[in-house]
Amino acid sequence: MCDANDYSKMFVGGLSWDTTDDGLRKYFSEFGEVEDCTILRDQDGRSRGFAFLTFKDPASVNAVMCREHILDGKTIDPKRAIPREEHLRNTRYFVGGLSHSTTSDSMRAFFSQYGKVVDCTVMVDRESGRSKGFGFVTFEDASNTDQLVGQPNLILDDKQVRKTSLLSRSYTVRNELIAL
């Protein structure tokens, strides 16, 4: 069963490497009282570029979702974190072997033939900004993705790619899985 706190939690992606916990908390305090705010960091203490925050009032999340956000010179991407048990119908795939020319938009267009794509991300290197050759695609539900599972050879941007279904963990983020 979910408690009210489950609907007050947000994932915030696209953070500047320079954004601090305090700066993030201060920014989102404009929308309501922030109970918890944590930027995830690697073993060397460097930002991983995303955070989780929890508002006291779930209505604050709705206020955040109604507009675009720029923090420390970067457009950030806040999304409501949804408890796993409410999200089991959604399907997320790892996509490897991507061409360096593949973008999130071209990947979204390609995978749209298999169902409604709700999120599509090509992972990029933090220093060079170049594609790491893999990404993630998330479908609204699994109803049309059976076709995808049965496809042994997928060609995207003139390169064969491989896909693997991911198992969910404790929270999803508007159709994107996040390990807590």
Image (cartoon, rainbow, N blue to C red):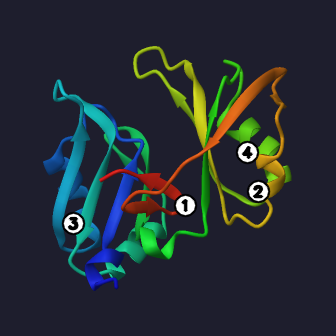
Res 29 label: 3
Q: CA distance from mark 2 to mark 3?
A: 40 Å
> Mark 2: which amino acid?
Thr
Mark 3 falls on what kind of element? helix
Q: Is residue 16 above or below residue 174?
A: above
Circle nearer the N terminus (4, 3): 3
Which dot, 2 or 3, sits closer to the camera?
2
Q: Nearer the viewer, residue 131 or 137?
A: 137
Reading the image, the residue beneath label 2 is 145
- Find the distance from the CA under tag 1 to the CA under tag 4: 14 Å
Q: CB under 8 Å between callouts 4 and 3? A: no
The residue at the far top in this view is 128
Residue 139: name its quadrant.
bottom right
Could you tell me residue 43's position as x and y percent?
A: 19, 28
Say above or below: 44 vs 70.
Answer: above
In primary-sequence order, the first of circles 1 and 2 is 2
Residue 121 in view of the camera: no
* Label 4: element kind: helix
The residue tagged 4 is: 108
Q: Is residue 59 above or below residue 95?
A: below
Disc on res. 175: 1
> Which x, y percent locates residue 104?
66, 38
- Whichever of labels 3 and 1 marks the residue nearer the N terminus, that label is 3
Q: Amino acid at mark 1?
A: Asn
* Of labels 1 and 2, the one closer to you: 2
Instruction: Tell me if mark 1 has few (under 14), some (14-19) or many (20+) residues whose alpha carbon lies within 10 angstroms of its own.
Output: many
Secondary structure under tag 1 reads: loop
**Viewer-closest of 149 and 77:** 149
Going by the numbered disc 4, the residue's amino acid type is: Arg
Q: Earlier in the sequence, mark 1 or mark 4?
A: 4
Marks 3/1: CA–CA distance: 25 Å
Task: Write down the quadrant of residue 53 in the picture.
Answer: bottom left
